[in-house]
Image (tube, helix red, strand yellow):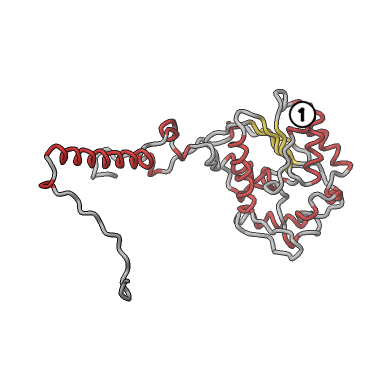
Amino acid sequence: MLAPNQTHQTPSLPLPQPSSLPPEHFNILLRRRHLLLSATAVTISFNFNAPSPTSLSLSEPVAGARGLFRMPPPRLTNRYFLVRAGESEFESMGVINTNPVTKTSVDSGLSERGKKQAIKAAFDLKEMRACDNNCWIWPAITQRAYQTAEIIAAVNGVTRSYIVPEYSFLDARGLGAYEGKKLESVSEVYASDGISPNIKPPPIGDGTPNESVADVFVRVTQLMSILETQYSGDTVVIVSPDSDNLTILLAGLIGLDLRRHRELSFAPGEVRFVDTNDIPVYKQPASAVYKCSNPPSCN
């Protein structure tokens, strides 16, 4: 029986002492111990310290990897055409409608004039030979943008499997308390944009976002990151329900101050090719290019 507070311990066998073993047996024991330790060390090195084949095969630094998209980009992997959807029913009535709750509503679809603008956009793309070697069409899921994409696909011989609806990154810019007001009042939003890209329109409680230029910039940058990672050497037609998505995206691509995005305004049904020659050469920060020829005396 064990006494209280006394725990059972497994008796340990005494280790053989060198003096109790013949010399040849003792040498064998040492060699076995050495081999065991060596094998353990090799295993640890193999599992944790060995460089992976992937890291050895990279030919460019991690900062230059395709998945890390930055604005303005040092290069573009694909060709891009930017299209503003044709006029919507709300726009034809001169009313601001940016609430994402109604984006798939029939009332958010193309007006009669909007359908003609979408057809013109489709033939403009055909004249620009945008989809001669096939193309991917990325419209916002907003009704007018998706209808425009379908017209573009029909005119340019693109099958439906190449239409990829975008569910959030291309939503029309949320204008908050301006929702339901006259289109002319949007000039007040653009006046604020010219002061700072971080100024938001006043909020509203009906679910309409109130987005600053900086908010939209985050969305369109995420979109470009996906497109540049998902495709390589392809043509992508981006169809936006409004102008602001496209002007802010284009400003980012060419390195224009975001406060001036309005200068790049798109009319309903307008098409533009993103010319990589307009994208400025990426400039490294001064700390990356500065060289001191006579340290520690550096001017």
| Furthest residue in direction top, as rendered | 132
Q: Residue furthest front?
A: 1
Q: Which residue is mark 1?
A: 158
In depth, the one of 235 and 165 nearer the eye is: 165
Quadrant of the drawing holding the C terminus:
top left
Locate the N terminus by quadrant: bottom left
Q: Nearer the viewer, residue 149 or 253?
A: 149
Instruction: Give the crowd class for mark 1: few <14, some 14-19, many >=20 residues within 10 Å.
Output: many
Instruction: Indicate the position of residue 31 as horizontal and vertical percent values.
Output: 20, 38
Q: Where in the figure is residue 286, as x and y percent of width and height?
A: 40, 43
Q: Nearer the viewer, residue 72 or 136?
A: 136
Tell me which corner region of the image, top left, top right, bottom left or bottom right, holds residue 186. bottom right
The type of residue carrying mark 1 is Val
Q: Which residue appears at 23% of the width and 54% of the height?
A: 13
In this rendering, the answer to whether 259 lies above or below 156 is: below
Across and down, in percent, residue 250 comes to: 63, 41
Residue drawn at the location 58% of the way across and 37% of the way down: 229
Q: Does residue 94 appear to the left or right of 281 in the view shown?
A: right
Residue 285, horizontal then vertical, whole percent: 43, 43
- Give the residue at the far bottom of this rendering: 4
User: What residue is rendered at 67% in x and 56% in y?
Assistant: 211
Left or right for 89, reference 177: right
Q: Residue furthest right?
A: 112
Secondary element at tag 1: loop
